[in-house]
Image (spheres, rainbow, N blue to C red):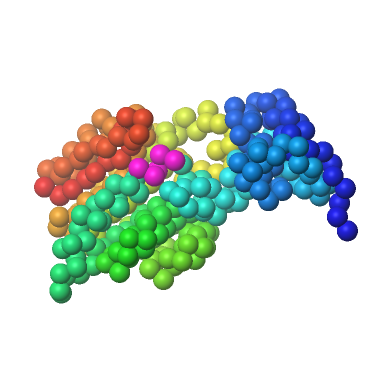
Amino acid sequence: MTAEPRGTAQQLLGEGVERLRGSGSETARLDAELLLGDAVGLGRTALLAHPEAPVAGEEAARYRAAIERRAGGEPVAYIRGIKEFYGLRLAVDRRALIPRPETERLVELAEAEVRRRLPAASLAGTPRVRIVDVGTGSGAVVVALAASLSRLGALDGVELLALDVSDDALDLARENAVRHAVADAIAFERADLLAREGGSGTGRRFDLVLANLPYVRHDVLPALPIATSFEPTIALDGGADGLAVIERLLAQLPEALAEGGLALLEIGADQGVPIVARCQRVLPGWRCTVEPDLAGLPRVAGISRP
């Protein structure tokens, strides 16, 4: 038996926007549209094209429950269980950090580097391009890269490894790899950065090291939007200056990065100068450049052997 309508889409959107604005949301309209679209099983475009459409009682109740969760500060991505990233719909929950749009720059640079290396890797007897994603979290970076290379027909030319210290995060990353049909192309292992339990390295050298590690200064964490309090602190806290975890990875690169290899590390918008200085101190003689994001802000440090 079909539930009786409990208002139109327009009415429910108005109700949700008012509730979220009252709770302090800066994106009340967008949040309400996304949550109502999920509740009724429609995309935002279809929803906005038919504001007069009736919404059944069960769907209205589901929407109102989602609005209350958002009003309490929970991120929309966790409420929906998905986040759009690099053209993919990734599963997300509290096991890992929500992928940010700025991290797409890291994937773009990684894809360009892989494509540059592939012609050499295709020669007879040449090993495939070896890539590791350190601190993979939801798997956003490695899954997006694998899916893109698959579309190009280039997935056979690479070896992909995803590492994380959290078993829960690795499970989520595997789920996303399965969801996008690239699970067979990626190996998943538990490790603290590039070190396995006991402190030993992976024993392998990589042509490309990718990492979106915690880079928020510890003293800034309490001032972040309440939504970030739902995310794992370990995925955000970069220590006193925001570069503590990244510095640990830098120290591991001499053993992990192959000759001619490249490390691409996401950094904060205010860390362009500090990361170069840190590289000079930890890896004297190595080269460090900083790539900007679409807003022109420092976003990815590229580190290579001399």
Q: Position of residue 106 (x, y in %)?
A: 34, 45
Point 14% across, 57% down: residue: 259
Q: Could one spot residue 196 in this view of the protein?
A: no
Occupied quadrant, residue 11:
top right
Q: Position of residue 174 (x, y in %)?
A: 48, 63
Point 15% across, 49% down: residue: 305
Q: Position of residue 288 (x, y in %)?
A: 20, 40
User: Which residue is more in the foreground, 153 or 202?
Assistant: 153
Occupied quadrant, residue 127:
bottom left
For the N terminus, which image quadrant? bottom right
Point 51% across, 53% down: residue: 90
Q: In the rendered structure, which segment of residues is drawn in magenta?
A: 101-105
Task: State left or right for residue 85 relative to residue 41.
Answer: left
**Magenta stretch: dominant secondary structure:** helix
Point 60% across, 41% down: residue: 45
Q: Could one spot residue 261 in this view of the protein?
A: yes
Q: Is residue 149 above or below residue 36?
A: below
Q: Is 149 included in the stretch rendered in magenta? A: no
Q: Is residue 251 above or below residue 118?
A: above
User: Which residue is more in the foreground, 85 or 171?
Assistant: 85
Task: State left or right for residue 204 relative to residue 230.
Answer: left
User: Which residue is more in the foreground, 205 or 238?
Assistant: 205
Q: Is residue 34 above or below residue 27?
A: below
Q: Is residue 164 above or below residue 76?
A: below
Q: Position of residue 144 (x, y in %)?
A: 41, 55
Occupied quadrant, residue 14:
top right
Question: How many labels, in total?
Answer: 0
